[in-house]
Amino acid sequence: MPDTASATDAPDASAVTGRSITLDGVTKRFRGQQAPAVDSITLEIPAGQVVMLVGPSGCGKTTTLKMINRLVEPTAGRILLGGEDVTDIDGDRLRRRIGYVIQAGGLFPHMSVAANVALVPKMLHWDAERIEQRVNELLELVSLDPDIYRDRYPRELSGGQQQRIGVARALAADPPVLLMDEPFGAVDPITRQRLQDELIGIQHELNKTIVIVTHDFDEAVKLGDRIAILDEGARVVQYDTPERILSDPADEFVEDFIGSGAGLKQLSLRRVRDVELIEAITVTPDVPSVDALARAREAGHDHVVVLDRNRRPVAWPSLRELERLPQLPSRPRADLPLVGTGAPLNDALDTMLVTSVGGALATSDRGQFAGVIDVETVMRAITEVREQSVPDPDAPIGTNTSDMPAVTKVDDDDD
């Protein structure tokens, strides 16, 4: 393994494996309720993009999500999946083609991790060898070692691990569409950030079509290619990119929903991958600690990064720690400051502020080490963003200087 690792350009995105979703005048009326829960929503979701549905409680966003896979049957309108009307498809068959993730993963407590992940492939009559291979592949994808976790039960997992298994199960049969209903709402903030980072990495690799319901606008900005802000009855108030919604909200409702600090939220649009990461000395756990110490001193570094066989960070000991360690750690430390390269710089800064190192380890797809990011790098980037966001004093008030037209309905080939 080389002595140093540095940031590299992100790998080319894989081919889009998702399918477009079209909601055409979709309405849902529940018996006994005068007003419709969803009132004639029309929305086009491009293949391979992440679309966030946000809005106040009771606005119909979860009902809209559930109508896509017909957990809730629409009263009127059409729902097209890649041009195919879902009402013409058997409901059970349809749901096997669409991944679905809820809070806490929705795992079956009496089934092992492997059995939970294998549920849909077994329904599709995959052979045992193919199922075992797929389970192992997906556990690796969500950063869980199959040798350690496949035979465990949900009660033996943390909340974050259960949520990872829920995502793995939803992806088991390689569906083109993934629906997620408040997927990270039941975990602590640090775990939520890491799960969001992992989802960004998974999507960068797989390019599914993902629709996520959330009440957290910051989460919508972080994860979404596009955000649909809904009012009562799932009325689409604005459907656009995070950049456009923050810089040019459609009306006062959107402004109120965004809340104060829209300028600060714009800073979250700058990602870890947009800045130059710092090289680090990397070693594997089998390297003697005295050798790791010698390498770091020779290179003039204060720390080394210990990586496992998959190049995932395990530890980040300082020279002083290396002097005391009889051998390097082989299991990941719980307090390791990690941030995904797809994460916003705000998240990176938050991660650094709870450590004494003044930096964080950036990880790319599948949690592989990409480089080190420090406070100085983030502050320089934030300063650049602030300078770039200063409005032109000569521009007329109310003028939208963006070259991108406002978006209320988009086509699959719209960039």
Image (cartoon, grey):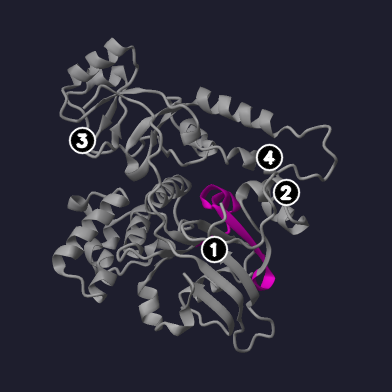
Cβ atoms under marks 2 and 3 closer than 8 Å: no
Q: Which residues are magenta?
A: 212-234
Q: Earlier in the sequence, mark 2 or mark 3?
A: 2
Query: Picture coordinates of residue 222 (x, y %)?
Result: 53, 47
Indicate the amino acid at tag 2. Answer: Asp
Instruction: Tell me the number on the disc at residue 248.
Output: 2
Q: Is residue 96 above or below residue 373?
A: below
**Does dot 1 land on a helix, a strand or a loop?**
strand
Q: Write down the quadrant of residue 92 in the picture.
A: bottom left
Q: Is residue 216 above or below residue 243?
A: below
Query: Picture coordinates of residue 363 (x, y %)?
Result: 37, 37
Indicate the amino acid at tag 4. Answer: Gly
Near mark 1 (Cα within 10 A), the count class, few <14, some 14-19 or many ≥20, is: many
* Residue visible at 49% across and 57% down in the picture: 185
Name the mark nearer the viewer: 3 or 4.
4
Q: Is 215 inside the magenta-drawn segment?
A: yes
Pick whichever, 379 or 355, lies toward us: 379
Q: Report the Cα–Cα distance between label 1 and label 3.
A: 43 Å
Q: Is residue 141 above or below residue 97?
A: above
Q: Write down the quadrant of residue 340 in the picture.
A: top left
Q: Which residue is mark 1?
A: 45
**Does dot 2 land on a helix, a strand or a loop?**
loop
Q: Report the Cα–Cα distance between label 3 and label 4.
A: 42 Å
Q: Which residue is mark 4?
A: 263
Query: Picture coordinates of residue 175 (x, y %)?
Result: 36, 65
